[in-house]
């Protein structure tokens, strides 16, 4: 995240961007009094994230359209929003050195404005005077004249040092892991969990690369649903490639897109072309890769919001099978129905209910995917606010739920059926520990080599990446697939595959 200082003045301080820092000397009457639309958009997203527990990736597109931003301003608002959210913990540590009260006692709107200004000063190519004056104008416009003096004074103090200088000062008295967390803007508990997971999967030396990947802006991944409507999903993917998307080198049916608004692409409105991380596509296809018998019954136990369910329903339809998509929350179940609308209705149904009560249906299923609720630490690139929103205490409730869902899935699985356990988290407590505990509770389960179906459907580049995996120190880790953003370019998806042995 931060480069080491290499230019210093006579006092040993690093020079900022090749020259002295410049702040506006304009009289108050001549300063801007309204926030510009791009900054205002970012501010509104941060407010929604802080007050409503919203996700930035869902709110930002709506706010960009609301402000009618052109492509350049939309890009600026996007970087300002995501960059501020990613580095929030580091920026708060810097702000604590420059605010004369606890940050928790500040008006949340003022704190968000300070974070936005700090990101512009320390991590963007924005002139210092513009960073300060535009943030002060935003505060006057959206909060009031009173706090503007505080914001002006604090940001001038923040701008007196560069980001490497602040990190060097703040990290001087920290331990190695805490200093690494500060430098790369991750909570220490997450850094500790990632380090442990990398070690368990045979990558002990790649922690910094992973942290850097978490802070990189992700590309958009596309999937073309394999629908029966004259292969319209494949046609839509072809059209996306013609519009600038690049076909995935990992698996078929996927592409990477960095051309802006996907709403302009053919097939998006019809839902046969949609956004889905290639890691998610890969593990869903892997469950359907081993030989499928006609008429199989499949179950997505935790289906919301419906991305994997739509892909699985499309694959089931190719074999004359049927997918039941289960989702406990009614509003999310409706999202699942909308996600599945592009697939023949003969091939799927939606159940609204607690996945742990799936046995009440008195049905059994040939293939089940448990894409369990988790901390989401594998998708920090796409949901940067999650790293600061999640707490270690969340694990206690989530891991109990994950185990209960696995138990319910085992009960509903047919003899000789396949069970996929998937999380978008590499945390060992949510991955390897869950697998080992499930095996100890259910002697009828056999842990298969999850790499095999993933290799079987991979393209040459994807197959090569999987085969280059180091030797994991444990049998469980050696048979479970852990994808990584810095290695595979996907979210950090975890995939374990079980077979239920006949009595």
Image (cartoon, helix red, strand yellow):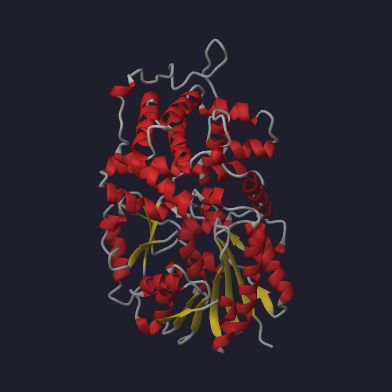
Which of these two is toward me, 155 or 293? 155
Figure quadrant of residue 367? bottom right
Q: Is residue 24 visible?
A: yes
Figure quadrant of residue 58? bottom left
Specify the farthest residue to the front. Answer: 146
Which of these two is toward me, 150 or 291? 150
Image position of 313 (left or right of 398): left
- Does 271 sit above or below residue 502? above
Residue 48 placement (x, y as % from top left): 42, 51
- Does 361 sit above or below residue 311? below
Residue 267 placement (x, y as % from top left): 28, 65
Please give the count of numbered marks on the rendered protein. Answer: 0
Image quadrant for the C terminus? bottom right
Image position of 31 (left or right of 471): left
- Does 91 sit above or below residue 249? above
Q: Is residue 206 visible?
A: no
Which of these two is toward me, 267 or 374? 374
- Does 101 sit above or below residue 456? above
Residue 138 placement (x, y as % from top left): 36, 36
Residue drawn at (64%, 31%), measured in percent from left and top?
A: 171
Residue drawn at (41%, 32%), measured in percent from left and top?
A: 146
Residue 54 placement (x, y as % from top left): 45, 55
Residue drawn at (46%, 21%), measured in percent from left and top?
A: 16
């Amino acid at each position: 995240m931060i480069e080491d200082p290499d230019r210093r003045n006579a006092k040993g301080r690093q020079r900022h961007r090749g020259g002295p820092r410049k702040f506006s000397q304009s009289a108050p009457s001549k300063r801007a009094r309204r926030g510009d639309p791009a900054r205002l958009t970012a501010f509104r997203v941060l407010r929604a994230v802080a007050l409503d527990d919203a996700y930035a990736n869902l709110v930002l597109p709506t706010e960009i359209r609301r402000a009618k931003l052109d492509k350049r301003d939309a890009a600026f608002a996007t970087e300002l929003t995501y960059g501020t959210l990613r580095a929030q913990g580091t920026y708060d540590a810097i702000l604590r050195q420059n605010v004369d009260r606890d940050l928790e006692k500040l008006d949340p709107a003022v704190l968000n404005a300070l974070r936005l200004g700090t990101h512009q000063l320390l991590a963007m190519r924005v002139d210092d005077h513009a960073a300060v004056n535009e943030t002060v104008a935003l505060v006057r416009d959206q909060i009031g004249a009173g706090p503007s003096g505080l914001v002006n004074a604090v940001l001038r103090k923040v701008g007196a040092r560069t980001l490497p200088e602040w990190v060097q000062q703040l990290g001087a008295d920290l331990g190695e892991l805490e200093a690494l967390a500060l430098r790369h803007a991750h909570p220490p508990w997450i850094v500790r969990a990632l380090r442990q997971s990398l070690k368990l999967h045979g990558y002990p030396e790649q922690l910094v690369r992973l942290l850097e990947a978490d802070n990189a802006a992700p590309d958009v991944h596309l999937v073309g649903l394999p629908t029966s409507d004259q292969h319209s999903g494949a046609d839509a993917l072809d059209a996306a490639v013609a519009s600038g998307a690049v076909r995935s080198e990992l698996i078929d049916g996927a592409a990477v897109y960095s051309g802006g608004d996907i709403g302009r692409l053919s097939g998006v409105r019809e839902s046969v072309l949609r956004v889905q991380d290639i890691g998610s596509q890969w593990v869903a296809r892997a469950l359907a890769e081993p030989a499928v018998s006609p008429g199989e019954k499949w179950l997505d136990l935790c289906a919301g919001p419906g991305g994997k369910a739509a892909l699985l329903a499309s694959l089931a339809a190719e074999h004359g099978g049927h997918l039941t998509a289960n989702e406990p929350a009614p509003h999310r179940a409706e999202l699942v129905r909308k996600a599945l609308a592009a697939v023949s209705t003969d091939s799927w149904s939606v159940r609204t209910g607690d996945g742990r009560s799936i046995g009440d249906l008195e049905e059994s299923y040939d293939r089940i995917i448990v894409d369990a609720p988790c901390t989401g630490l594998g998708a920090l690139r796409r949901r940067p606010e999650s790293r600061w929103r999640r707490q270690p205490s969340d694990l206690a409730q989530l891991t109990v739920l994950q185990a209960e869902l696995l138990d319910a899935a085992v009960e509903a699985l047919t003899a000789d059926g396949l069970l996929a356990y998937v999380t978008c988290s590499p945390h060992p407590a949510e991955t390897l520990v869950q697998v080992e505990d499930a095996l100890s509770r259910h002697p009828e389960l056999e842990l298969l080599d999850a790499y095999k179906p993933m290799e079987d459907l991979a393209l040459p580049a994807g197959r090569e990446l999987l085969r280059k995996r180091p030797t994991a120190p444990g049998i469980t880790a050696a048979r479970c697939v852990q994808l990584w953003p810095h290695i595979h370019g996907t979210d950090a998806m975890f995939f374990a595959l079980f077979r239920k042995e006949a009595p």
